[in-house]
Amino acid sequence: MQDGSLRAYPLSDKGVSVGALKDYWYLNIHDNDNGQIQGICLSHDDGCLITYGGDGNIFTFDLWSDEELPKDLKVIIPPPRSGLEKEKGTEDITDPDAYTIEEDKQKKEYERKMKEAEEKKNKKREELSALRQDFVFLLQKNQKLPKHMQLHREEFEMDCRIFEELDRQRLQRIQLVQKQLAWENEKQLIGLQKLQTQFQDSLEFTLTVHAIQSNHQISTYSLLTVSEKYAQDKKHDDSKWALLKEKRTAHKETEQAEEEISRKTESVVFENQAEMLETPEVRKPTTRYIESRHQKIRRLVEKYDALKAKIMKRRAEWHELYKSKPRDNYENAEDAEEIKEARATIGCYRLKTATNYTLTEDDRISTEKKMIQLATLEDLIHQVKVNMNKEIVSLRDLKVSIIDEIKSLVKEVKSIQASLDVSEHLPIPLIPQLHPDEVPEKIVEYNSDVLLKFKEEQEAQAKLKEPLEGCPSSRAFRHVFLRPPPVEQGHPVAQAGDASAVVTEEQNAFEMEKAEPTEMELEILKREKIKNLYLQETLIKKIKTLVINFDAELRLLLHKKLKTDVQMKSAALRCLTCCEELLILKKLEIHEDLLEEQICALISEQEDIQSELKSYLTKMEDRKCEIVMLQEREKAVYASFEASLGENNDFADFLTDILKKEVEYVEKEEVGREADEENENEEEEDEKPDLKTDEENCGSEDVVFEDSICPEGCSEDLFLNTIQLRQQRIGIEKALAEEKKIAADLKKEYDALALKAKEIETSLDTTNRELEAFQWAKLHRLNDLCVVVPLRLHQVQCLVDGEMPRDFSQTLVFTNQSLQYLQKRIVDQRNEKRMQREIHKKAKEQHKQLLQEKKEMAMEIQRLEERCNDLMMEKFGRLVDFEAVQVHSVNIPMEQMKVRIMEKEYEHFVELKEWEERIVVLQHQLTNLTRENSSKLHQLNRFCHEKHQLETELESLTGQGGEFGGTRSADIKETARLESRLVHLTCEVAFLSKQIN
């Protein structure tokens, strides 16, 4: 049971033995790997055996006895075959393409199914053809019947939903086929798009529009389409400036919004405070007063802000006015430059071929500028041609619409002529047709008919090459593009319908011929005839008008195109000249680049040197400042020494010598050391004459003795202070010497750099002159190019002795507009000169008047200022700044604090009032409780008296017990009653005392 198999052992009635287990019935029912039998059980009637295994399967077996077992189910085991050893074994199949046994069986089964399906299809086709013939027979039979007995076509339809279901199934099948061929269709479309982008999209179609009544025709320009990359780059360059403008405008808008927000914050604060004070209840006088104070402060703030804004605005206006005021010796730079240029160029007409012609930096021609110019020119040419092509295409579209309109009008004319007599028919104009060159895009268009024709050609070629095999491409085209034949060609139902329609029309005509018109009908027919004649004439005139207008539009556009052709030819010649100039510039570009590189290197070097010179200047200025500071410190040392000496000091000379002599002492000490080494005693030669005294010649030992010992009568503190000042002076002099040395070194380096900067500047000037000379030579070479200028004979006005010269090299070429402009400009210059003189004269007079007014205004201002000062002195006793008074007239923070104090006082008052009310309530409660307690105390006192009385009565009764022996039982009862009452009173007293506590 581990491998999912089941064994059944036959058991005899005699008993179970080992030999009986040799025979068994074996059956694999569960999975061999995962089908371990988990359990075996019998049904409730012992008629079935049920097994379930680990593979999740459950099997049931019927248990039959020998009597119930049918004879047909007994298995007969066949005997084994003999002679198998002599038979030859089957050979292995070595062909890799051969079918396996399973594949062969599947193929045979598939062929059988296909054969059965074809048989069913043929049977259905035969049935459908028989039904179709019967239906056609019925239709013909129906048409032969009289009209009143004929059935309508709709009555032959059994159920319209059948056709809807058929259409739905057909659509589903079409969608299924489209899904199956979607990948192949997408693949073919991508290949077609690649071919179109490679060959077709790079060119624009050239179409020719023909006139209808004449031989005029107009053709479009043949152009190459602009690449997407070029268009994107151009758009990107154009959009940069737009982005910069948008950023600037956005930045300005944000600044304005921030200013508005800052202005509104103060007013919003006060509004919020006012809203906080608002309550749905009726406001009390205090809150109203606080709110009024808030409003007052708000008005004061608004007034203060308005006053401050007015003052600031006035200050800004005065600032702008003073800022715009020109100086006395002011000269406009632009006017001065224009005057200088006019003086230099007035009356001088220099040509570019002149030797003294100078080029500015903007006029210099480079390869990049020429390439940009050429690209711009080509772009303009392409744009003009594209616009003209669009107009021609729109004209072709107009012709198409006119043809459609003419067709509809001709159809109307024919319908009108059908109701007229033949003698009254006017000749119908011919319908214009489109020429093949007017719709060149249809050359590359295709449809199913074209593809079927292509399929037939492919099949014919394939039959010539491989007569035994079919063309594989034809099958693909058959599935994709093969369509059912139209109904008009051979469908019997359609033919029957047409036949019935013809029969009905003939019958109607026959009936109309039989009827005789009345007088009213004749009158109506006459009116209709007149109307139809008018409509016929009107429609024919409209057709002729459309044709004439189209031809006129074509001739106008043709005239415009001829002018454009002249402009395009001139532009093409200009492009040719630009290309020649570009070639020359390319040849000269190397030398120009070398010169520009030299200039750039010199400029960068000059900038570096200028930066170094500035750094040296700053260092020198710093050293000068250090030197000045040290000198000031030295002066401060001497000043402090003079201050410490005081007046009439007996040791002033001695201390002064100590202060000044230390420099000489240090120098003498150094000389003494050299003398000890070389055994020589020499005195220094560079001693200052003003520091020498009589005591200096006494020897070095005396100096040491004098410097180290304070003389008698001299203050020791003064002596020590002098020694400290001497040390400070020595340090300052050493630092001063070092700073001077460093300053001298910086000066030398600065001079060397300045000399180098001058050399670089001279070399830069020479290089610039070389570049200017090169630019002039380049311009001269460009001017030597031959330029084509188309002229007409009436434009040539250069005559020599009344004849046209053969050589025009010494003449100038002007357009008529330029020549007229120059002639007009002469007159304009004279008028401008006269006007400028008048303006100058008026300006002089105005200047004099303004000077006089300025003096008068200054006197008036001075008078008003004096009067204002006098009035302030009379009223205030001193001069007052009214702007400061206006600005600081109201202390807004103090007013706000006052309002806040009032709010706090009001809040405290309300809170105190609430507490007083609560105290009153509590006092009432206390009095009530006191009254209740007092009443309960009175009740307790009464109970105590009653208790005392009862106790006395009880004692008296117990004392008289012998006297009342006969009434013993009554006394016992009375005693029990009194005791119970006493207990009850005691409980009440305890309860009341508890409540009182």
Image (cartoon, grey):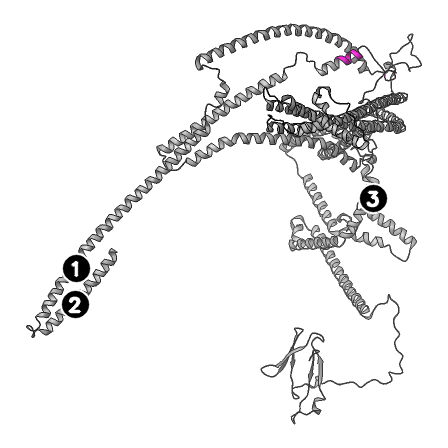
Q: Amino acid at mark 3?
A: Leu
Q: Amino acid at mark 1?
A: Phe
Q: Which residue is mark 3?
A: 195
Instruction: State the SS at label 2.
Output: helix
Sequence-first tag of 1 and 2: 1
Which stretch did the figure color magenta?
339-354
Mark closer to the observer (1, 3):
1
Instruction: State the quadrant of the N terminus.
Output: bottom right
Which residue is found at the position 12% from the left and 62% from the top? Answer: 949
Question: Measured along the vertical axis of the image, is residue 834 above or below residue 108?
Answer: above
Q: Which residue is mark 2?
A: 979
Q: Amino acid at mark 2?
A: Glu
**Residue 422 horizontal/vertical position (percent):** 75, 32
Q: 765 or 91, which is in the foreground? A: 765
Question: Measured along the vertical axis of the image, is residue 661 above or below residue 339?
Answer: below
**For residue 31, which quarter of the picture?**
bottom right
**For residue 437, which quarter of the picture?**
top right
Q: Which residue is mark 1?
A: 943
Instruction: State the quadrant of the C terminus.
Output: bottom left
Tell me how far mark 1 sits from mark 2, CA to CA: 14 Å
Q: Is residue 541 visible?
A: no
**Residue 567 horizontal/vertical position (percent):** 82, 24
Q: Residues within 10 Å of mark 3 (few under 14, many from 20)?
A: few
**For residue 671, which quarter of the picture?**
top right
- Residue found at the far right of this picture: 806
Circle number at residue 111:
none
Q: 850 or 631, which is in the foreground? A: 631
Instruction: State the SS at label 3.
Output: helix
Q: Residues within 10 Å of mark 1 (few under 14, many from 20)?
A: some
